[in-house]
Amino acid sequence: MPSAHAPAAPSRRLCHECGLSRLCLPASIEGEALDRIERLIEQQRTLESGQALFRCGDALRSIYLVRSGAFRSTVEHEDGGSSQVLDFHFPGELIGLDAVAGQQHTCTVEALQRSRVCVVPWSTLQDSAAHLPAVQKQLLRAVCRSHAGAYRHIETMGARPALCRLSLFLRELSFRQSDRQQHADLLQLPMSRQDVGSYLGLAEETVSRLMSRLHAEGILDVRHKVVEIIDQAALDGLCERDP
Amino acid sequence: MPSAHAPAAPSRRLCHECGLSRLCLPASIEGEALDRIERLIEQQRTLESGQALFRCGDALRSIYLVRSGAFRSTVEHEDGGSSQVLDFHFPGELIGLDAVAGQQHTCTVEALQRSRVCVVPWSTLQDSAAHLPAVQKQLLRAVCRSHAGAYRHIETMGARPALCRLSLFLRELSFRQSDRQQHADLLQLPMSRQDVGSYLGLAEETVSRLMSRLHAEGILDVRHKVVEIIDQAALDGLCERDP
DNA sequence: CGCCCTATTGAGAGGTTTCAAAATAAGTGG
DNA sequence: CCACTTATTTTGAAACCTCTCAATAGGGCG
């Protein structure tokens, strides 16, 4: 019935049909306002593994909404040689807000695997936020959520023992996966051990060693980039600062 | 001349007369829009050293603009005993945005010394942002600036050697002081050594030891809570990851 | 199938933490 | 204003953890 008159919208139902909208920019937005947000999406873009979404120093052009895959953001250290992993980004998350303060990106973001993003031009988004309080609110909440994530990361790095940091990292991944309706105890680690080490302020060998140890103790089942949590309670215990 | 007709505004020129407005919420806002922002300030509040602005779990009621003094935000760890310093807050900075995502505060903020803040009710601020794009923009930038600070903090904690972390911390304080028109090389440390240690993921003894060492090497002049940077170049050198 | 990159595992050196004690500052009440 | 108590800071020595260097094993991609 409705198909008869519908102007055959050219598959621009991106957000309506996207399972991530609950997490993404349009969270808690429905109806016409959602249509408006959909129209902000300039294009979708696919990135191959290793490809950069933008690099440190690039001018702020767009904000990106992760549709699938995973990303890693890094900063190059002044001395040139070393770089450090600042964050990982999964479906439903916004990327690029690091440039809002200074109009240019402060880190480099690369795909860890074949990934897909929705591209939202910043100028358009800003205009939209100025007119639609709902968009403005969501944008602010997205930044604040990201900020809260950074605080959790700081908390994790402040948890001294390496085992404790790794446990917190795995728990965080587990939470984020279940947010996306994925198994909370069958973790997909799209990043390398080196990335994990850099993210946690540890050597990659330490990460590898601790993974093996947790496997040997029956707490994890480590199969390359797939890690299954066998004993959640034990893992939670390791997140405490002491033992 | 102008005093003749002026309606003797009852000292509500808070922002106009505040030297921090360039850093604070009203940054780059002038004229009538600035008046509007001024009117958002419900009251000013003075806190004694150690007094809490809010505690973890409190409902989001207001955002606070630091006028003078210094603050420390901490999270209590689940196990109860330990807590961790997440951030320090100085004049011109916004406090309280951590609660925007979830409507309740995720950390506890306490004054490190007698301090003064402007109190802006969140509901009022939100309304104002919905109507005034300038306010909206500033609010977003403030969060993003704070987010950028968190990323720098992560970068600092990822810089493995303790000496390197401490150097980066001192440099950061120096930058923030010069932003506030204070001497860049005469640092005021309102927080304890333990706070610094917690902030950097180090033991307080390590912080103390390294301070002494830098003093002995003639790079710093450490006088209790006042630290003078004698050899800026040497300190910068220590910020590199290697030596 | 073979190369290359990543991950794992081992052993030693080094830096930080811990525990403990002394020295210094800060806050309190007379 | 001083003496007292309390808290913070500094310094020391030993133990521990993590890093580094090095070699091996395992997957992934052409």
Image (cartoon, coloured by chain):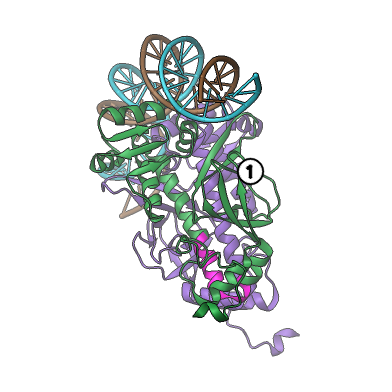
Chain colours: A purple, B green, C cyan, D brown
- The chain ID associated with circle 1 is B
Asked if the magenta segment contains residue B152, the reply would be no
In the picture of the structure, the residue carrying the numbered disc 1 is B52
Secondary structure, magenta segment, majority class: helix
**Residue closer to the observer: A54 or A131:** A131
Q: What range of the chain is rendered magenta? A: B129-142
- Quarter of the N terminus of chain A within the rendering: bottom right
Asked if the magenta segment contains residue B133, the reply would be yes
**Residue closer to the observer: B3 or B34:** B3
Q: Is residue A227 something that shows in the picture?
A: no
Location of residue A192 by image quarter: top left
**Residue closer to the observer: A118 or A17:** A118
Q: Is residue A149 something that shows in the picture?
A: yes
Query: What residue is rendered at 47% in x and 72% in y?
Result: A122
- Above or below for B172 versus D30: above
Query: What residue is rendered at 59% in x and 49% in y?
Result: A176
Q: Amino acid at mark 1?
A: Ala
- Quarter of the C terminus of chain A within the rendering: top right
**Residue closer to the observer: D27 or B204:** B204
Whole-percent x, y for residue B40 in the image: 63, 66
Whole-percent x, y for residue A210 in the image: 48, 29
Query: What residue is rendered at 63% in x and 85% in y?
Result: A8
Whole-percent x, y for residue C10 in the image: 37, 20
